[in-house]
Image (cartoon, rainbow, N blue to C red):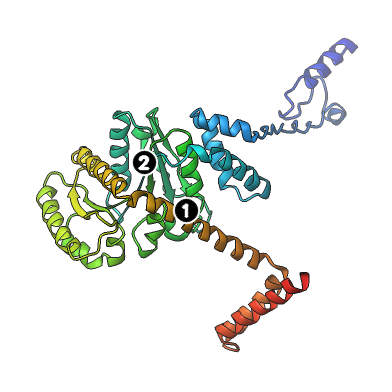
């Protein structure tokens, strides 16, 4: 074989793809093959493109302009626990403060299977068609295994998610009380600043801890099912005293008569309870979210509620009280975080836990010992 033929074989070898298998030139025999086989080249390292972090001004202007991409990024910012993100988020919220508080905030909860997502999609779509801009803060329960959301509200509200006047933000509850993410209030502020005049907060389910929702919305709605006799037996009185309206969903077909019977039973029960909002009578209604029946009626009820409570001043009193409660909740969260992050607490807590578990020390004594050790360390620093 001539030198030119060998060079052509070598060129063919070198032209192999970087991630392809090494190939022996056709002219190489078995004994000399190893001298011509080229080792596979390592793949080129992946290029990591870091997105430039937005400034406070960029976030503020983007949110005020109604840019949904920047709004989503701003929500991610306030949900972050990184110290630099928390500082940046607070600056953004402070700049947006004059533009918040102009929406109607509606909390929606319900027993499992009541059709919360179907109702919210039908209700939200109706409001969008009426010219409103609707933000849905759908709080997913957090998986105990992965820590991620497991419901996927955007996939369950496809029609509403595609509407140009709607914004859906599913986020994991993170184990927060009542299934409401601890940053929901900040998210609500961002949505209001972006021009969404109706905020719908969907909670995970029903329970006494749902008072957390009551503490951040104007109108609280409970979705229920037919078969009120059985439902009332299992329904906690606490949740009934928190809501401003009960809606028996799936009132269609053979369920219509059952829904009317359930409505009557709920109204009889509600008659003996103190209303959640002074000057407002909580009542039960029926609807079929699947067929859109009763949706417009429910909106008229909410409008009447807002008009009535604004005239009496209850609407604004509640908003002021919610701000105060929020402040106290933030203080508690801050103190708790600082306490468990303290070195002396980290050191003593496991030992005291073992003492309590083994029965060697009462819980009260263990707590007192831990707190006293923490306070001594704080005093030493002063």
Q: Is residue 203 visible?
A: no
The 10 Å Cα crowd at callout 2, few under 14, some 14 to 19, many 20 or more, is few
Q: Residue at x 16, y 47 (%)?
A: 251
Q: Which residue is mark 1?
A: 323
Q: Position of residue 157 (x, y in %)?
A: 36, 38
The 10 Å Cα crowd at callout 1, few under 14, some 14 to 19, many 20 or more, is some
Q: Is mark 2 in CB contact (under 8 Å) with mark 1?
A: no
In screen coordinates, is 368 left or right of 39? left
Dividing the image into 4 quarters, which one contains the N terminus? Answer: top right
Determine the image quadrant of residue 344: bottom right
Relative vertical location of residue 211 with respect to residue 162 in this rendering, above or below? below
Name the residue nearer the viewer: 64 or 246.
64
Instruction: Work out which residue is located at the far left of the displayed protein and give it.
Output: 257
Q: Residue at x 52, y 57 (%)?
A: 327
Q: Which residue is mark 2?
A: 156
In screen coordinates, is 306 left or right of 258? right
Q: Position of residue 148 (x, y in %)?
A: 51, 50
Name the residue nearer the viewer: 381 or 360.
381
Relative vertical location of residue 272 with respect to residue 316 in this rendering, above or below? below
Instruction: Work out which residue is located at the far bottom of the displayed protein and give it.
Output: 360
Name the residue nearer the viewer: 175 or 56.
56
In screen coordinates, is 36 left or right of 107? right
Determine the image quadrant of residue 159: top left
Label 2 vs label 1, nearer the camera: 1
Q: Position of residue 66 (x, y in %)?
A: 48, 29
């Amino acid at each position: 074989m001539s030198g030119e033929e060998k060079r052509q074989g070598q060129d063919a070898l070198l032209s192999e793809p970087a991630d392809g298998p090494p190939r022996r030139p056709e002219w190489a025999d078995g004994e000399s093959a190893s001298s011509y086989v080229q080792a596979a080249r390592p793949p080129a390292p992946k290029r990591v493109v870091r997105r430039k972090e937005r400034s406070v001004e960029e976030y503020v202007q983007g949110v005020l302009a109604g840019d949904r991409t920047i709004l989503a990024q701003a929500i991610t910012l306030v949900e972050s626990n990184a110290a630099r993100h928390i500082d940046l988020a607070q600056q953004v919220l402070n700049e947006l403060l004059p533009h918040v508080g102009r929406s109607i905030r509606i909390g929606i909860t319900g027993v499992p299977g009541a059709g919360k997502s179907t109702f919210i999609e039908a209700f939200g779509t109706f409001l969008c068609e009426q010219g409103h801009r609707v933000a849905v803060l759908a709080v997913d329960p957090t998986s105990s295994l992965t820590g991620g959301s497991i419901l996927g509200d955007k996939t369950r509200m496809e029609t509403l998610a595609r509407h140009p006047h709607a914004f859906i933000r599913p986020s994991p509850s993170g184990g927060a009380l009542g299934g409401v993410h601890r940053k929901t209030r900040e998210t609500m502020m961002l949505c209001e600043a972006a021009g969404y005049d109706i905020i719908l907060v969907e909670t995970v389910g029903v329970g006494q801890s749902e008072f957390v929702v009551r503490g951040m919305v104007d109108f609280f709605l409970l979705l229920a099912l037919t078969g009120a006799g059985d439902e009332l037996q299992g329904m906690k009185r606490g949740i009934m005293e928190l809501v401003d309206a009960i809606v028996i969903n799936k009132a269609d077909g053979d369920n219509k008569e059952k829904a009317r019977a359930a409505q009557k039973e709920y109204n009889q029960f509600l008659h003996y309870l103190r209303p959640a909002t002074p000057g407002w009578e909580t009542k039960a209604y029926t609807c079929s979210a699947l067929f859109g029946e009763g949706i417009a009626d429910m909106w008229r009820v909410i409008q009447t509620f807002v008009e009535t409570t604004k005239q009496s001043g209850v609407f604004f009193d509640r908003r002021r009280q919610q701000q105060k409660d929020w402040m106290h909740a933030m203080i508690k969260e801050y103190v708790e975080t600082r306490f468990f992050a303290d070195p002396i607490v980290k050191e003593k807590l496991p030992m005291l836990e073992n003492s309590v578990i083994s029965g060697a020390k009462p819980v009260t004594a263990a707590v007192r010992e831990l707190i006293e050790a923490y306070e001594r360390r704080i005093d030493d620093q002063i």
